[in-house]
Amino acid sequence: MTRPTLDSRGVYQFRRKVPPHLIPIMGKREWKRSLGTKDCEVAMRRVYSVSEECAQAFALAQGLYDGNVRLDANDVQQLAARWFREELARLEATGDYGHWLVESYGGGFNERDGEPVGRYFVTYQMVVDPDSNADIARHTAPSIDAVLQQHKLPLVAKGTPLHNQLAEAFWSHLCDLSTLCLARVDAGGRYVAPPVIAPVAPLSFERAEAFKHEGRTILAVWDAYKTDRIASRRAATDTTLNDYKGIVQHFVELFGDVPISSFTNELAQEYRLKLARTPVSKGVGIRGIDALQQIALADAQDLPRISPATAKKRLRAMSSILTFAKDMGWIQANPIVDSGVSKRVARDIIKSGGSRRRKDYSRDEIKAILSSPVFVANWKPPLTDLGQALYWMPLLAAYTGARQNELAQLYVRDVRQTTDGVHYLSILNDDVDDGHGRRVKTASSRRDVPLHADLLALGFGAYVASLPSSGQLFPKLAQDARGKFGQSFGRHWGPYLSKVVGLESPAAPMHGFRHAFKTLCRGVGIPDDVHEAITGHSGGTVGRSYGHMPLARMAEELRKFPRLAQEAGLLQ
């Protein structure tokens, strides 16, 4: 097996020369992959799986050379359809429909500064010459290469008959995707049905032996699990998958990319024990070294370790992936479940008192927050302009129990009033997809939430009226890479509570309001089904899933809710 070498940055990599007769098929003279580490021991653990990937790529290329493996017309269309399906899923998750549109201008130029005016979007087929094979190949080549690499196929040299066939198929699907994007942009983000494409089917060379579960590694199962989750379009998929990705990578750093069939009960127990020795990621010198080095450093310096609750979260993530593998028939049992390690960690949590940690703000803590400088002295962060978000979002959370991102992503149009005079927030209750990437955690999270009279007395209505009717309720909060609007708020709210307010509470900075809202509702006798409807919890019985909770009933019950702003001195 080829030993890893160092690149110019001192990072280990795996390199192999492509046999001369395979160069025209693979389109390159050398096959290489970064091993992502500067540590020789770690590189040697990773080199085996990368070597296997290289061997598979060479074997497939040899098969193409010998004529034993070839892409037929159906394969070409299937690869293009798979690309279309995955790209559409990504666009629908992010709302970035402009990615496959071409920005254009019309209407001349601005007389003062010569800038073009009349900015608009057109589809790819409107600006690309359909008779120009070179133009079509240039636009489709990146997508073709990405799909071939995803399926562990050798890259196809440009200009060959096979590449021309792929370019033609991908161009057709790119045009369909671009047209769909323009339709959704013109429709204001409303849903427009996609075109009919080839149904999912195996490629001609995807024989049973290529899918033997004995050869599937942890990372291969993770890729399949991720694809399944994206296809199901479950709520909060991006955040969950990002968390799970880090957990899987951590496991691979501990044990390598082991075959799924070798994940035994014994390995599950060893994983649990290593998690117990894993340090928290914020320690000095922790970042930048792999999982085994982190444990060694933590042992040497007696660093703080992750809590049993965090260990349970990581076990639960790996268990979900193993359950998926079991459902697919790749393993016979879930070792994390069968070994009982989750139950033992749960007992550790109980012994440590973690399950009894208070999650809601107390009445005194809420009073301290609402009488702090943000609310009484117009305090603002020194270097960041969040507008009025720091003032209104905590108040709205305290009086509605809404989640941080639910509030951060609201638009002005989401603040409404019924004909009976009930003021309320519409949290994506009538928008399936508004084209802005807004999302909720569960189906029951789509709801109407009445506004307490205190919020109106504090001037919330005047604040809303001061904003453009088509804009965000908190226009200074921008979406992050994961599509969330509340991250910039969260980065300042937590430090504000600890450093400016001096609050010492076990409750999470914003989620503590959600727990406190439920506690206060129970304290004043607001029925469970009412405050569950307000907070978007589904409830515990099948009967509660029938019909809906009238907004007027929720508003009437909310009058019982404590006047928190008055207790803090914001209202008389």
Image (cartoon, helix red, strand yellow):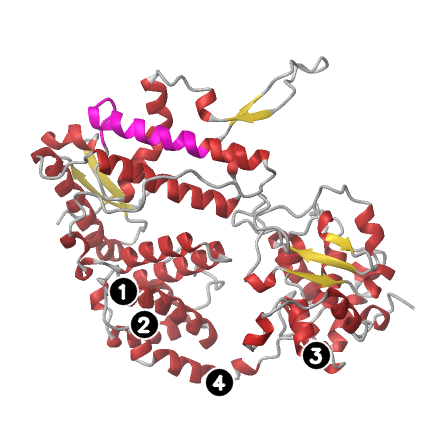
Question: Looking at the rendered structure, which numbered label has been put on residue 527?
Answer: 3
Name the one closer to the observer, 537 or 394.
Answer: 537
Question: Looking at the rendered structure, which numbered label has been put on residue 350?
Answer: 4
Taking the image as drawn, is residue 40 in sight? yes
Residue receiving disc 1 = 255
Marks 2 and 4, Cα distance to the nearest angstrom?
A: 20 Å
- Location of residue 426 with respect to 199 vertically, above or below: below
Residue 78, quarter of picture: top left
Which range of residues does the magenta coloring cover?
156-177
Task: Identify the element where label 3 is drawn.
Answer: loop
**Label 4 environment density (alpha carbons within 10 Å; few <14, some 14–19, many ≥20):** some
Image side of residue 277 versus residue 384, left or right: left
Q: Name the residue: 20% across, 68% down.
A: 262
Task: Give the mark, 4 or 1, whose residue is nearer the N terminus.
Answer: 1
Task: Identify the element where label 4 is drawn.
Answer: helix
Marks 1 and 3, Cα distance to the nearest angstrom?
A: 50 Å
Image coords of residue 527 (percent x, y): 70, 79
Name the one closer to the observer, 253 or 557.
Answer: 557
Marks 4 and 1, Cα distance to the nearest angstrom?
A: 28 Å
Residue 443, quarter of picture: bottom right
Taking the image as drawn, is residue 501 in sight? no
- Location of residue 381 with respect to 327 vertically, above or below: above
Image side of residue 62 versus residue 294, left or right: left
